[in-house]
Amino acid sequence: MSEPIRVALVMDHPAQQFTRGFQLLSAEPDINLQVYYWSVAASFLDPGFGRPVSWDVDLLGGYTWAAPAPAASVPLRLRWIVRRLRGARPEVVICYGWGTRIARASIAYCLMTRTRLLLYGDSTWQHSNRGQRRIARSVAVRILTQASTGAISTGTFNREFYIRQGMDPRRIWSGVCPADTELFGRDCVDNQGATYVESSSLHIGFAGKLIPRKGVDELLIASSMLPRMANWSVTVVGDGPLMAELQELASQLGLDDRVTFRGFVNTAEMPQILTSFDVLVVPSRKDMRVLVTIEAMAVGAAVVVSDATAVWGPGDLIEDGVTGLVYPSGDPAALAAQLRRLLDDRSMLATIRSNGLARTERFGPASFARTTASAIRECLHSSTKG
């Protein structure tokens, strides 16, 4: 029997949506997985939430990982990751993004040692040409995509991003940016065949950071356009620098009796919170693979997303009118129209909830482990063959 494939997976910090996927990937008999982190700080200041955050679930159990000493300086951390890679001699390195220090050090190591490099991220063609220094950044990314062995795509728009950067589609392996659907599925109420009546309340929710690009103001304005005679409510879950401003906007729109600001909720509480929503709205003005979208669908909520997110498209998580609804970002009237459809047509609401729940089976940790393992094997085989 041949030796397992030595794989190094490099990330800036632990993320709860990947923990179960790493555990399952580690269990693959022909893969020897080692995860390297830049930092595993138990608590950190999240500027988006505007508060210190300490995750209340285990992010490091069930797989092999390593990180530099907490007090290590940047030069020591860079030296640490290079030494680790040299000692492990991975056959394949999977790099999460390319903007962090640990990513750039790992990319440099792969290019200098000709180690197979697989890119993994959520960049999309929608947003890749925005912002300052976009030309220089685009040139750098194009060079990187040409020099790497390939990429694991995380969705329809992400795959198109790599193609637009000049990567051969044959070097792009379909993957998954997962949520822990197993965890959230435990709190799911089976909505198959559920019956809704016109008088029942529609519980609309948002969950995320209260920052400008998340578009919560757009949701509030859209809510003010919903019929006041109907039975509906909005719950905003999250915290951030815009909390007071959004509360004031809700009051100005006359929504004090309709909108509740729940505040920050940690991971362990989220399944129960999302289960209470009939509809989750993701009104982001710019976003990639929005984790809460999959989590909400996994507990049986219908999802309405803006077209500035990257979770929709042919074959992706959200297919408009089938597994969710999509509206043009920046158009609160269009968002209100989509919400009215679900408010008025409970049969449609039930169908979208059911279809969305079924779709999440393709975006869980098992799919992540399976598709990532397949990409590793094919990458190794195609490189050896070539």
Image: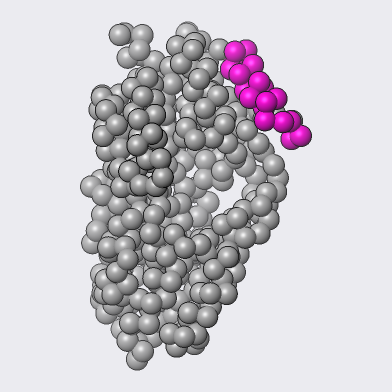
Q: Residue 384: image x %, image y %?
A: 36, 8
Magenta segment, prevailing SS (helix, strand or loop): helix
| Residue closest to the far bottom | 229
Does 192 appear above or below 251?
above
Residue at 60% x, 39% y is 13
Q: Which residues are magenta?
A: 70-88
Camera-side residue: 185 or 117? 117
Taking depth in this image into account, of 58 and 223 the one nearest to the observer is: 223
Q: Position of residue 243 (x, y in %)?
A: 56, 71
The reply to whether the magenta stretch includes residue 80 is: yes
Q: Quadrant of the C terminus?
A: top left
Residue 208 placement (x, y as % from top left): 51, 61
Q: Residue at x 56, y 40 (%)?
A: 19
Which residue occupies 66% across, 52% down?
A: 45
Residue 87's place in the image compared with 145, above or below, is above
Q: Is residue 38 visible?
A: yes
Quarter occupied by residue 50: bottom right
